[in-house]
Image: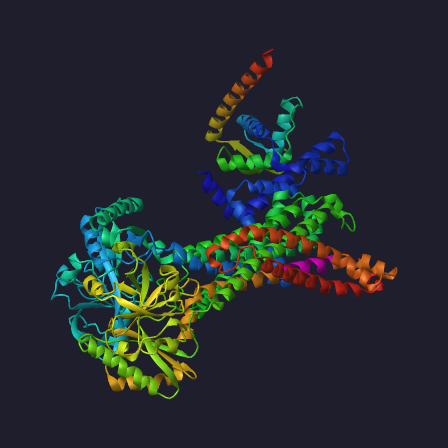
Amino acid sequence: MLKTKNDLLQGTLALLVLKTLARGPMHGYGMTLHIQLISKDILRVEEGSLYPALHRMEQDGWVSAEWGISENNRRARYYRLSAKGRKQLAAEEKNWERFTEGVAHVLQFV
Amino acid sequence: MSWIARLRGMLKRDRLDHDLDDELRSHIEMRVADNVAAGMSPEEANYEAQRRFGNTALLKEDTREADVVAWLDETARDFHYALRMLRRSPGFTAVSVLTLALGIGANTAIFSVINSVLLRPLPYHDPDNLVMVWESNSQHVNAHNTVSPPNFLDWQSRNTVFSGMSFIFDEHANLTGNGDPEEVVVQDVSTSFFSLLGVNLLLGPGFTPENGQSGHDNVVILSYGLWKQRFAGDPAIIGKFILLNGHPQTVVGVAPQNFDWFIKDGSLTGAKPQMWSPFVFPQAFHHHKEIGRFMTVAARLKPGVTHSQAQTEMSAIAARLEQEDPDFDGHWGVNVLSLRDQISGDLRPALLILFGAVAFVLLIACANVSSLLLARAASREREMAIRTAMGASRWRVARQLLMESLLLALIGGGIGVALAVWGTNTLLAASPRNLLDLLAVSIDLRVLVFAVAATLLAGLLFGFLPSYISAHSRISETLKEGGRGSSSARRRAFARNAFVVAQLGLALVLLTGSGLLIRSFVRLIGVDPGFDTGHLLTFKITLPRSKYGRDQSCITFFQQLLARISAVPGVRSASMESFPPLTGLGAATGVRLLSQPSLALSDLPVANVRVVGPDYFPTMSVPLRAGRLFNTHELAAENHVTIINRAFADKYLHGVNPLGQKAVIYMKSDAEAESQPSEIIGVVGDVHQLGLDTAPEPTVYWPHSELVMSGMTILVRTSNDPLAVLSTILNQLQQLDPELPMASVATMDQLLADSVSRSRFTMVLLGIFAVVALMLAAVGIYGLIAYSVTQRTQELGIRIALGAQRRDVLRLVLVQGTRLTLLGVAIGVVAALTLSRLLGTLLFGVSATDPLTFAGVASLLAVVALLACFIPARRATRVDPMVALRYE
């Protein structure tokens, strides 16, 4: 059941999407390709969770979306990072660093 | 900002949906293109792309669900679907709705009474600070004893806890001029009475402190009812004169429409006031304690003073008074009672019992509806399984079903409230007139809130289990063909069985309560009142002192009246008494028996004092136990004789011959009483003065000549219907004195009925609830067995085909029903044994664990339940094996 999502993963997805969009506007499919590629196939975005997340981010004002034409002349919806989104990205990146730092400390402790 | 986006989202719903569709489609197309480019076949490419997306329908829903506002949209959709489902099975819906309407309606009706009597603030300003202040004697049972005027004055001057005090006592008076002579009830009060209660008069300035002075007290305030009825609502009534007992009084006020003040304890007339008048204490009241105790007292607590503080201080004042005058105030204390407790205290137990009963009825009704839902759920299992397979979460499935339940509850509740409004009005119209003395019952906001809460609670209650079970059904089992043995089916069967057992148990508890009350009531009316109540007419006459100032004129008048009445054809005999029996009205005082060692006044034995006319005891058929009755000589003039009743003889003159003893009865002034002890000339049987449920009190009887009272109750024994001779008697009265009204006309049988009216009322209501509960429980078990038979049609058909006899089939079917019935009865009996104790004061002459009642009620329930099982069982025996075997 999709409702029992892992909150951590949900938060991470937002971070990844925001970071991806920081490089420029992209459509949903492009984002899944990008993340899969750059993470060296470690992370695969579930389409089922991507679109609800994008919708939420749009509601919260972190991204804006509009229709455009894709590379192969297809109609696709492009998402663009907003100023608010940029601030959110910075905050999330900071949180992520602190989080990994904390986990590293615990793991290093023998 | 995001809220605006959401709202905008909701408005552009369709376009967004469309957009999302396009977006997803384009995403898939792009992936397909890539897949094909990577070498997959078009079908594989398609399949892989789709699979990665999973359930698009669910995805779209989840995307939409990110909207808070979408939730409302979904609820609306659930609602419409639920409505459609209910409309599709009208029989089920009708039965469920009616059952719920009954349960919720009954609860709302009873709650509205509870609200009016126990919860709603009384119609006075700041009513929680109002209290009644009584005297109470530690040696007697009566905690609400009327107050003596000098004590009242002492309380008033010595207390620091009350911001105001008022005395109230009532009397009859004759109103003449402006129409027929009419006897009215007048309350004599302090001039501060209305301001104490914080009541603004409808008309007029009201009483001023000046009215409390002699010569300035000839003013009255009319009740709204009297003003409308006798004075046609004359707006210029203020300043006009009326004649009260022949004395002119100026009208200085009219009370507002809903204003009333009636406290049953201490009332000398037992009726609601029609007029208020200030009362000036004669000089005697201030110093001599000869006037006895007859006032009621109301007071208002000062802001910040608590009830217990007031009680403490008043008890201290009473203690000091006791020291100062041990003769009069020995053993007397003070009882401060909140007005709320005074008015509704004795109704509380009955109301709470009824509320508990009606809550049980609602529970039984909910169990019925829940059972129906469970039965229905079985046929919808497939639908639910498909939903779950399509990706609906358990919560979603449950939510849909709960919505149906809530919808049922809302419809049932709506009808129920309408029923309650109609029912309450009908109930009160049909109920005894003295049921709710001071309070009007109506449906207000609190009652509506209660109804809504009860409805929602009921809906959740009966809807929970079916929706839970349905939501947790195992899909795989159900989707297989003929999945009847599934675990959820088993759970449903268990739930239904449990419901039936619970219903039977609850019904048994109610039946037991009802049975106990019925037996109590039968015992109550079986009590011998001590006199013959049939064919006895009663009415009151009050002679105005202005016309009948001298004692002799009173005596003569009554003599003549009784003589005339006795001569009327149809009348067997006639007499009179100061207060009629069974009404709780009366006066009591101390009696000093001269043959016994001297006691202080406050330690004296207490007896009721009744003043009677000639032929009283034969007219009433009260037996003479010893000695003789009053002779003509004694009835005509003061001769200082008295007749006592058996209770008096047993209690105070035990083992001694009472005849010839001298007794000082302190009903006149002390000096008079002590110089004229009465000789006991006879002993008569006991009469119940207060009511059938109270033991007769020691009583002394005086002939009218001994203590001439101007207000007497006339008692007429007739050969046939008492009311048939009424007009002739009225005629005779008017011939004697055309200005005298006849008041409080009633037959003794009516008075008897009035005295037991509350018990009867509670018994009838509880009986109705018990019968409803029994019927609902019977329907419940009938439904269960009928359903079970339907389920087992195939099995039974096979058995019959294989040679099972009719009685074998019966036995098979009845086994389940019998087991459930026995279990239900057993649980019910245990519950009833623990709960019947709560009936407490409502029981009379019957113990709370009366075995006869329990046995009778348990048998009744068992028989009814088994009968309810029998009907479908009989149907089972007629199953045609050929049809059954083909049935799926």
Q: Along the horizontal axis of the image, is B292 left or right of B509?
A: left
Q: Residue at x 47, y 61 (%)?
A: B109
Q: Position of residue B774 (x, y in %)?
A: 60, 61
Q: Position of residue B687 (x, y in %)?
A: 40, 68
State the residue lying farthest toward the top: A110
Q: Position of residue B427 (x, y in %)?
A: 46, 67
Indicate yes or no whether the magenta region holds residue B737.
no
Quarter residue B25 falls in: top right
State the residue lying farthest toward the right: B802
Position of residue B748 relative to residue B311, above or below, is: below
Colouring scheme applied when the structure was drawn: rainbow
Q: Which residues are magenta?
A: B776-788
Q: Is residue B80 visible?
A: no
Q: Position of residue B173 (x, y in %)?
A: 24, 72
Q: Along the horizontal axis of the image, is B729 left or right of B425?
A: left
Q: Is residue B623 visible?
A: yes
Which quarter of the rendered picture does the N terminus of chain A lie within? top right
Q: Residue at x 63, y 33 (%)?
A: A29
Which quarter of the rendered picture does the C terminus of chain A lie within? top right
Quarter residue B871 falls in: bottom right
Relative depth, front residue between B887 and A70 = B887
Indicate yes or no whether the magenta region holds residue B780.
yes
Prevailing SS of the magenta stretch: helix
Q: Along the horizontal axis of the image, is B285 left or right of B815?
A: left
Relative depth, front residue between B735 and B678 = B678
Q: Residue at x 46, y 38 (%)?
A: B2
Position of residue A31 relative to residue B886, above or below, is: above
Q: How many marks?
A: 0
